[in-house]
Amino acid sequence: MYTGPRDEEPDERDVELLRQERERRERVQSRDALSWKIVGWVMAGALALLSYDSGGAALDAHRAGRPWLYPATVSVGCALVLLGLVIWALRRRS
């Protein structure tokens, strides 16, 4: 059984099906790209909020003489992940 390229030209129906499949793939790719952008913005906002809130909690705990290392670590960790996300987005853009 030979499974190589066809010897005859594809008919109009095959060409139309291939065109529709290509358009469907392009729509799926653009929708996926948009959804990843939205996820990235939501994640960046959540990381910024968590970093800000944990930093404030660490500062309040330090001023009150309570343990402050854990919220400070969470704040720094979130800030580093946010920085990594921003760098990754900038590198993908250029």
Image (spheres, grey):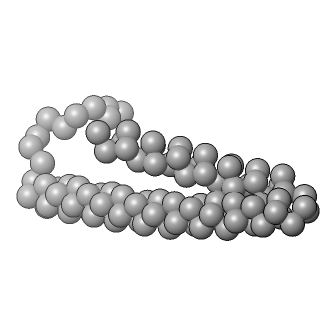
Query: Looking at this view, is 29 or 40 the one in front?
Result: 40
Between residue 48 and residue 17, name the one nearer to us: 48
> Which sits in the foreground, 76 or 62?
62
Q: Toward the viewer: 78 or 63?
A: 63
Res 15 quadrant in image: bottom left
Q: Position of residue 20 (x, y in %)?
A: 20, 62
Q: Is residue 56 left or right of residue 88?
A: right
Residue drawn at x 52%, y 66% as measured from the top left: 45
Q: Looking at the image, which residue is at 76% across and 50% down?
A: 73
How many numbered discs sit on the rendered protein?
A: 0
Q: Position of residue 90 (x, y in %)?
A: 37, 44
Whether residue 60 is visible here, answered yes or no, is yes
Q: Position of residue 74 (x, y in %)?
A: 74, 55
Q: Is residue 55 left or right of residue 60?
A: left
Query: On the rendered structure, is 93 left or right of 62?
Result: left
The structure residue drawn at horizontal position 84% and vertical position 52%, both measured from the top left corner, is 69
Q: Is residue 43 visible?
A: no
| Horizontal side, residue 72 vs residue 23: left or right | right
- Which quadrant of the view contains residue 32? bottom left
Q: Tell me the quadrant of the picture where the N terminus can be found.
A: top left
Q: Quadrant of the C terminus?
A: top left
User: Residue 27 location, x and y as percent?
Assistant: 27, 64
